[in-house]
Image (cartoon, helix red, strand yellow):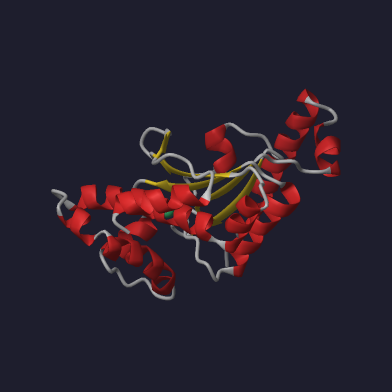
Amino acid sequence: MGSYDHELDALLERNRTWAAGMTRSDPTFFARLAQQQTPRYLWIGCSDSRVPANQILGLMPGEIFVHRNVANVVVHTDLNCLSVIQFALEVLKVRHIIVCGHYGCSGVRAALHDLKLGLIDNWLRHVQDVRNRSREELQALPHDEARLARLCELNALAQGINVAESTLLQNAWARGQEVSVHSLIYGLDDGVLRKLAPSFDKPEDVAERKRELGW
Ligand code: CO
């Protein structure tokens, strides 16, 4: 009978070391943060443990509001994601919404190859919709790794479009709120973020991008 409590104990010890170090370098850091958060950014990314928003952007606690799910999917009926976007827009008043995909995404890979993983297949159906919309472009690529890389990009673009087409963004722009939506992709092998397309600052930007993609 093994107990794994020592693994949790080790995590809690790491936390105490971190908190003490933060307090040493900035004695009022936690007291200030406890008062309020005023992040400028909302991050919608993949749950993948290799793509932690704060660390790859070099941001501190309090600087970015985060929502993550498998394959960074934004569905127009997902109350969880929509609630995050609404809170970020209307309460926190973030200036940027970043939808970030990453190369080598296992969720995207499963969607690309119709892998059967269980319940999650239903969630990844949304990525398959993206695959099916760009079937010709993907089939023209020389091999599966190129197709996976491109579908990771197309998925981040598609989910950025979903954010921009949500009633939340459409209403925010209609009332004159300044907020931009960006689609980025992260390289697991070099740690670098790349912009996939010009940002959306207004509804017309979305229509233009969809025309370019043939969607
Ligand atoms: Co992923």
Rendered residue at 44%/75% (across/down): 119
> Measured from the top left, where is residue 103 in percent x and y?
35, 46
Rendered residue at 84%/36% (across/down): 32
Q: Which quadrant, please, contains the N terminus?
A: bottom right
Q: Is residue 36 visible?
A: yes
> Measured from the top left, where is residue 94 in percent x and y?
67, 44
Q: Which quadrant, please, contains the C terminus?
A: bottom left
> Measured from the top left, where is residue 12 in percent x and y?
70, 47
- Please indicate whether residue 27 sits to the left or right of residue 5 in the image: right
Q: Quadrant of residue 115?
A: bottom left
Rendered residue at 69%/41% (across/down): 39
How many dots with numbers?
0
- Please indicate whether residue 195 sits to the left or right of residue 56 in the image: left
Q: Quadrant of residue 36?
A: top right
- Residue positioned most to the top: 25
Compared to residue 189, the image places residue 44 above or below, namely below
